[in-house]
Amino acid sequence: MTTLDNIPEPTVYDLSSPGRSGVTLPKPDVPIQELPENILRDDLDLPELTQLDVIRHFQSLSQLNHSIDSGFYPLGSCTMKYNPRVNEDAARLIGFLHSHPLQDVNTVQGNLALMYELQEWLKEIGGFAAVTLQPAAGAHGELTGIMMMRNYHLARGDKSRLKILIPDSAHGTNPASTTMSGLEVIELPSDDRGNVDVDALRSYCGEDIVGLMITNPNTLGLFEEHIEEVVQIVRDCGGLIYGDGANMNALTGIVRPGDLGFDVMHYNLHKTFSTPHGGGGPGSGPVGVSERLVDFLPTPIVTIVEKGNDQDPPLYGFATPKHTIGRMKAFNGQFGVLVRAYTYIRVHGAAGLRSNSEHAVLNANYLLSKVQDVYHVPYKRACLHEFVVEGRWHDAPDIHALDISKRLMDFGFHPPTNYFPLIVHEALMIEPTETESRETLDKFADALLQIANEARDEPELLLTAPHITPSARMDEIQAARQLVLCCRPSYLLDPQYVKK
Ligand SMILES: *Cc1c(COP(=O)(O)O)cnc(C)c1O
């Protein structure tokens, strides 16, 4: 096995050569102005390159990263499914692309119609009475939902409720958004089948809880077996149910969380409803609510102001809910992501969405069945859209989940989610999604099985992986603490450098 040295990618500054240029500026169509001396600089340090240099540089940078378009990306809880290009075409339609949120509503009726219909479809998919499209991400939707829950209690004059119950398997954003909203998190243990421990839930439920925040299927990829009982227990003590619907990839078209008794839920359009994500966005986290929370939705909500008839389409506009929690975002949400989700839903239709969920579940169970004799499965049950195994063996004491993940990169795969959920030791959380073929799943399973053998026979291979990627194994701490995201001349990165 050959090991590539870490060869740092040259920056555009390293490639620069004085006098080269690839820019052709148009002739100015306004009078040329003298600029004040004090804002003119001649030491701008701009790199000087030809167009070809620049194109090659960025083209080669773009190939250093793994992406869903370059390979399998089974990152659990993230739903890295293929994003059909028709969504992108729709989001780039000139009418959508060039519209501005400050335009008069009469000039953006098409945008509002799309938002209104998307609200209606998400209501139908989730089983809710109303939906806001405002939140910019899942975590933002959580904050929105929790604020509505709290305000619901306050509006009834009930000020004593300050706690939210959250299972120990929850995504980190759940306790984070609860804490941000000023409420206290009570952690619920899981039972030995990976469900919420119902007895513990009962003991924590009281007149001081705002409600329960639950993920179903949970982050182990398991359907909550006592969900109706869980909902009833929380209801009986006056609490509301928040459903974390970031991952609707197993339920869409099959189960409606509103029908299970959930009062509020966010959808991650950038996961289930397909938008390129990872690397920080953009996202969109609409929130659906049951009848009792409709009046608390953020303002504004897209609505029909004047019904249409045979000749005229309806007139769309904005409304402010009676007890609104206020605005959660400037303007009206991540419109480009809304267009992609609208297109995705429209292209697939009801039957297509259901079939996607079925195939997501089938793919995950197929993969699970291929690896479960070799990788320990902490909760042995049929999974939904994802599953969790342990990345450790007693007879390979030096190997950790991280080593397995790094070695998978040598096979051209993106690693699964590592060390989450926290209740599983050395967790590897695998979500294949419905868009992968059986051949890809087979290759991935073969890689996992081969790595399990290597862990015993050649552990060094895992401990030094990856070997074929542009960068070798990172120092994870340094990589997080000293992120170098800016492209600067290398002398500026030199700690000895003193500005003239
Ligand atoms: C991704 C995810 C979130 C958070 O969504 P963001 O858009 O990243 O803020 C919350 N809960 C679960 C279960 C998730 O998978």
Image: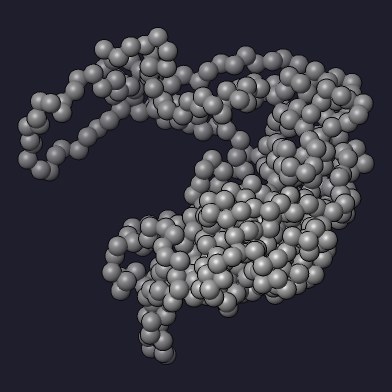
| Image position, residue 362 (x, y; %) | 80, 57
Q: Is residue 256 visible?
A: no
The image quarter containing residue 6 is: top right
Residue at the spot x=34%, y=61% of the render?
101
Picture quarter with the N terminus: top right
Q: Quadrant of the C terminus?
A: top left
Residue in the picture at 38% in, 17% down: 492
Please identify the residue farthest to the front as the structure is shown. 160
Which colour assignment does the render follow? one colour
| Relative side of 29 to 407, left or right | left
Can residue 37 be seen here? The reply is yes
Going 15% across and 26% down the picture, which residue do you hit?
A: 40
Rendered image quadrant of residue 128: bottom right
x then y, percent, for residue 364: 79, 51
* Residue placed furthest toward the bottom: 310
Q: Is residue 220 above or below residue 261?
A: above
Q: Nearer the viewer, residue 226 or 20?
A: 226
User: x%, y% of residue 33?
Assistant: 7, 35
